[in-house]
Amino acid sequence: MKKNIFLVCYGAGHINLIEPIVDKLILNENYNVKLLALTTAYNKVKNKYTKDVLKNIKDYLFLFDENLDEILKNGLKIFEDNYNASSGLSKLEVLFYIGLSLTEEINKTSYDTAYSNYQEKGRKSFLPVDTIGKILEHENTDLLISTTSPRFEKASLLASKKRNIKSIQILDLFDDDINKPIADYTIVMNEKVKNNLLEKGFKSNQVLIFGQPAIERSVNSIFGMDENLILDKVKLDRKKKVLVYLSQPPLKFNKIDNSYSRVDYKEINPHIFKMLHSMTNEYNVLFRLHPNEDITDYEESFTQYPDIRYTNNELNLFEVICIGDIIVTPYSTVAIEAVSSNKKVFTYKPDYNEFYPISFFKELPFIYSNSFNELRDNLRNKKIINELNSSIEFLTFNFAEKLEKFINSI
């Protein structure tokens, strides 16, 4: 008899984690695989999988026929807050999705309490355990696989536990947002993350070091590139090594509540560009903007320092990582892809920040600096650079194969 595997995924980011898993599992004749792709996750893969595999929340409307009027009525109350026409989501999908969650909260407490909680916390107040539980029962689920989003994905893990359905949770990066085991098994990218979970009370046999499929796919793309062809294309000085700066929107982080605020580019750009300019005698210095940044915020600095090369218009992200000998970034998670590609990665805390948000980036194999000046000194320190062991295994590979083998064993 086939094993019914049900995957739940929320948003355009987490679908990159789940997609390689679905690609692998649907090839196994012993599995009946279904993916509930919520919100923008659905749009990213709607043309890839058959309707037997890919499910939208609207596909389960019939399960809630008895309360459908109430669900849609409640959804309308908060529809304007949650509908974005540019998202590509249909109005019915959004209405049903938020209506389900609000209705369940009303049934658990009261209308006044549920609506008050929503006004205070937004959708963070939702945890539709009973809703997703009904879907899991309908699909006769034997195994649930999900990631770490705090609403539908977390609810699916809790619902599976209530129904004695085996469950696997995949951490997208680190363990910052998980304090106790929810799933039967938790998958992490490396030994460091596992050890942190063990300190929080997880059992060793419940934490599996399989890697991270989205990062693995990125790294394999980088490994598959021809570095010499890229270098020829951009015509760099082959006598110099390549230093790549990966920017981030400048943010000031609040340690107390994990909030952040924007910092004016005029405050930070002079420090960054002056530091990078000081490296141009030794390196070809390449600069890549984050997708959420605008070149107009940097034009004055690029004009002042023409030896720092803007690359967004000629190289993609993987290409700049491929040719980079040294990667510098304040706190971009692209640092993980770079260090997993055996690059020497320097992270740092800008001077305007008192708090650095990613503790993992302060430890080897990353070289962390506490200020602009320390970063400059570390980049000039040949001993640090030469002794940095870029072969430290930060990411375990062959995720999908390991997961499939494990599923066969449980």
Image: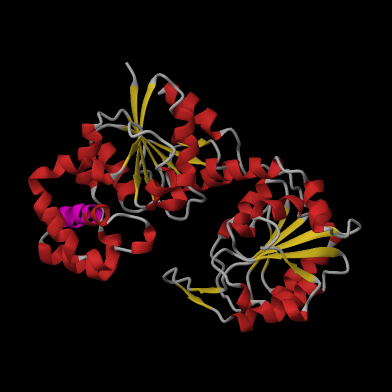
Q: Is residue 264 within the magenta segment?
A: no
Task: Identify the residue at image location x=28%, y=37%.
Answer: 160
Q: Residue at x 52, y 43 (%)?
A: 194
Q: Would you say the magenta stretch is mainly helix, strand or loop?
A: helix
The part of the chain drawn in magenta is 96-105
Quadrant showing the C terminus? top left
3 on left or right of 303:
left
Query: Considering the image in quadrants, where does the N terminus appear?
Result: top left
Quadrant in the rendering for residue 48 = top left
Q: Residue furthest front?
A: 47
Query: Does residue 261 appear in the picture of this structure?
Result: yes
Which residue occupies the foreground of this view, 271 or 70?
70
Q: Is residue 148 visible?
A: no
Residue 156 vertical position relative to residue 259 in the rendered view, above or below = above
Residue at the far right in the pictured view: 239
Q: Is residue 295 left or right of residue 125?
A: right
Q: Position of residue 107 (x, y in %)?
A: 11, 54
Q: Is residue 387 above or below residue 6?
A: below
Q: Residue lying at the far bottom in this picture: please name it.
A: 266
Identity of the residue drawn at 64% across and 79% down: 268
Residue 332 in percent (x, y) is at 59, 61
Residue 223 spot, x, y in % from top left: 70, 41
Q: Percent position (x, y) of residue 187?
A: 47, 39
**Does residue 410 lie above or below 248 as drawn?**
above
